Structure formats: C-alpha cells, structure tokens
Image: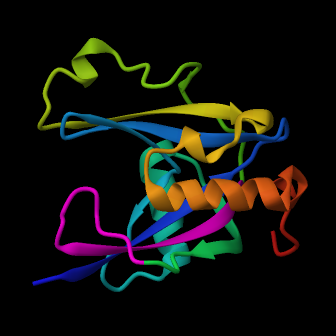
C-alpha cells in the first residue's frame, strides 16, 4: 500500500549568512540535506521541527515563516511505495549555535560509516555564495535552495517578531 510520508525541514541562517546543512550516511549512501525529519502521529509541523532540531542538534529553535511545501510528485528515495510531502520553515536558534561543525562534505569518522546498516550525521555551514541546488542531494531540497537564494539572506536570518 502506498503511503504519504510527511517531512519537515528547517532553514537556519546564521549572522554570517551561512546555511546549516546536514551531511548524512544512510544505508550505505551519502546525502546532504537540511536538518529535520518525519512528522509523527499527533504532532503539528512546527512541533515536529522543534523536536527534530532538538534531537539532531541539541538546539532550541523558534519556527519562523513557512518557506515551501512540496507541490509536485516525489517518490521517497528510501521506500519506493511512499510519496514524500516536505514542508520547510525558516528557523531561528534561541541560543548560540554550538555544534561540532565540519568544514568539508561527508567528514565522517571511520567508525561512523563502518556499518552500512547504521545512520550517521554531521553538520556544516554553507556560505551564502555557495547556496545552490547542486549542494543538495534530494530533489525537493534542490527546489528549496533556489527559493532561499531568491528571497535573499536577510529574509531568513531576520529575527521573527513573535520571539
């Protein structure tokens, strides 16, 4: 049976106008994507993204403006029976971003990629000038990268009025 898989992702730009991305090792493959993950039953999309950011980065974030919701058919890269619906929001860190940040793509320690049945994740910043679709692995993220560039760095890094 085909299912809908709802994913929620965050666009976090820092004061230097850099975008936080997640390099992931999943089932033996490498992906660059935005931080976030799957919506759980009983959860709203904003609550999901707060939970995902907390689980993945340890950061408490404010969910800002909605950026994009998938408006085309996309099959899951991991299960060819699921249709992916992704929702993207700008997020704002409520505390200083203190993460183990890598400087090059897929900079995993050997033990993080030794077992192809396991998953690993590392974070890095992408400078504003390097924010382009080809930086991302997944089709929907590629669309979002174009939207981020179109809106400009000030849009995503501004402090939301309701903070």
Report the side of 41 relative to 98 (left or right). Answer: left
Q: Residue at x 33, y 15 (%)?
A: 109
Question: Looking at this view, is 83 or 27 the one in front?
Answer: 83
Q: Residue at x 83, y 68 (%)?
A: 160
Report the side of 153 relative to 108 (left or right). Answer: right
Residue range corresponding to the magenta coloring: 73-93
**In the rendered image of this protein, does residue 106 appear above or below residue 67?**
above
**In the rendered image of this protein, does residue 6 appear above or below residue 142?**
below
* Residue 80 is covered by the magenta coloring: yes
Tell me the quarter of the image containing the N terminus.
bottom left
Question: Looking at this view, is 6 or 99 the one in front?
Answer: 6
> Residue 144 appears at what percent x and percent y?
62, 60
| Quarter assignment of residue 23 | top left
> Residue 18 appears at what percent x and percent y?
75, 38
* Residue 74 is covered by the magenta coloring: yes
Q: Residue at x 22, y 56 (%)?
A: 78
**In the rendered image of this protein, does residue 69 appear above or below residue 26?**
below
Tell me the quarter of the image containing the C terminus.
bottom right
> Residue 156 appears at what percent x and percent y?
79, 58
């Amino acid at each position: 049976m085909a299912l809908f898989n709802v994913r929620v992702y965050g666009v976090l730009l820092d004061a230097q106008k850099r975008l936080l991305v997640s390099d992931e090792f999943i089932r033996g493959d490498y992906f660059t994507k935005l931080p976030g993950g799957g919506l759980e039953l009983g959860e709203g999309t904003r609550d999901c993204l707060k939970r995902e950011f907390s689980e993945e980065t340890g950061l408490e974030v404010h969910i800002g403006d909605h950026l994009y919701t998938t408006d085309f058919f996309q099959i899951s890269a991991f299960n060819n029976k699921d249709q992916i619906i992704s929702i993207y929001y700008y997020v704002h860190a409520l505390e200083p971003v203190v993460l183990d940040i890598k400087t090059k793509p897929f900079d995993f320690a050997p033990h993080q990629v030794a077992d192809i049945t396991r998953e690993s994740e590392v974070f890095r910043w992408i400078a504003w000038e390097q924010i382009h679709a080809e930086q991302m692995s997944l089709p929907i993220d590629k669309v979002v990268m174009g939207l981020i560039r179109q809106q400009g760095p000030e849009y995503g890094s501004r402090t939301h009025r309701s903070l």
